[in-house]
Image (spheres, rainbow, N blue to C red):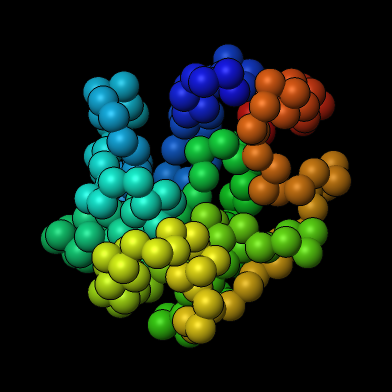
Amino acid sequence: MGGRDKSFATLGGVALVERVVARLKPQVDVLAISANGDDARFAALGVPVLPDAIADQGPLAGVAAGLAWAATLPEAPGHLVTVAVDTPFFPEDLVARLATETDGDTIAIAASGGRTHPVFALWPAATAGPLATWLARGDDRSIRGFLTGRPAVTVAFPPTADGLDPFFNVNTPDDLARAERVLAARGAAS
């Protein structure tokens, strides 16, 4: 995206981060954003911003920060759901579907079109300890690496009614232009 923060790339005149927050908020009890840097840039969203406790560990550090934050809440949830900011059309029933497919102790990971999307996952609170240990080792920062050998279930999501992968993500200006076309075809509410 030309070196700019994808969070604030606009789709239909609305920043991607605003779209993702609006799409996820009805699915969860509490919401936070995992981000490094100046958290003031997210102030208008009115949600906590969680920096990584361990630098340069990729998305897993964000998962770890989210699990640590969730444990401090007055009514600590049993799970944390994670989504990516550059995926504006993820399913509106993501959390419910992931929760339905897990026994509570198993990580539930979204999939579509024969591919897993491990950033879109439901993480049991008990994952916090093993994840902290994994990150402390520092030799493999990938979500897929962490998931190897851990109890996990894959939950398949079908394409949307218009044939789009529900986890289509915006990585390039061309992707953003495609997302604009999808949004226009669906109507501004999507």
| Residue depicted at x 65% and y 39% | 169
| Residue depicted at x 51% and y 69% | 145
| Total count of labels | 0
Between 60 and 155, the one nearer to me in the picture: 60
Q: Identify the image quadrant of the N terminus.
A: top right
Between 168 and 130, the one nearer to me in the picture: 130
Between 90 and 50, the one nearer to me in the picture: 50
* Position in image of residue 61 (x %, y %): 34, 54
- Quick check: 48 above or below 42? below
Residue sticking out furthest to the right:
163
Q: In this view, does 17 lie to the left or right of 131?
A: right
* Position in image of residue 108 (x %, y %): 53, 71
* Position in image of residue 161 (x %, y %): 83, 47
Between 71 and 144, the one nearer to me in the picture: 144
**Which of the 4 image quadrants contains residue 114?**
bottom right
Residue sticking out furthest to the front:
139
Q: Is residue 92 left or right of residue 56?
A: right
- Quick check: 81 above or below 25? below
| Residue depicted at x 46% and y 70% | 146
* Position in image of residue 30 (x %, y %): 31, 51
Q: Can residue 102 be seen in this view?
A: no
Q: Is residue 121 left or right of residue 139?
A: right
Q: Identify the image quadrant of the C terminus.
A: top right
| Residue depicted at x 49% and y 19% | 4
- Quick check: 143 above or below 54? below
Q: Is residue 103 visible?
A: yes
Q: Is residue 130 left or right of residue 189?
A: left
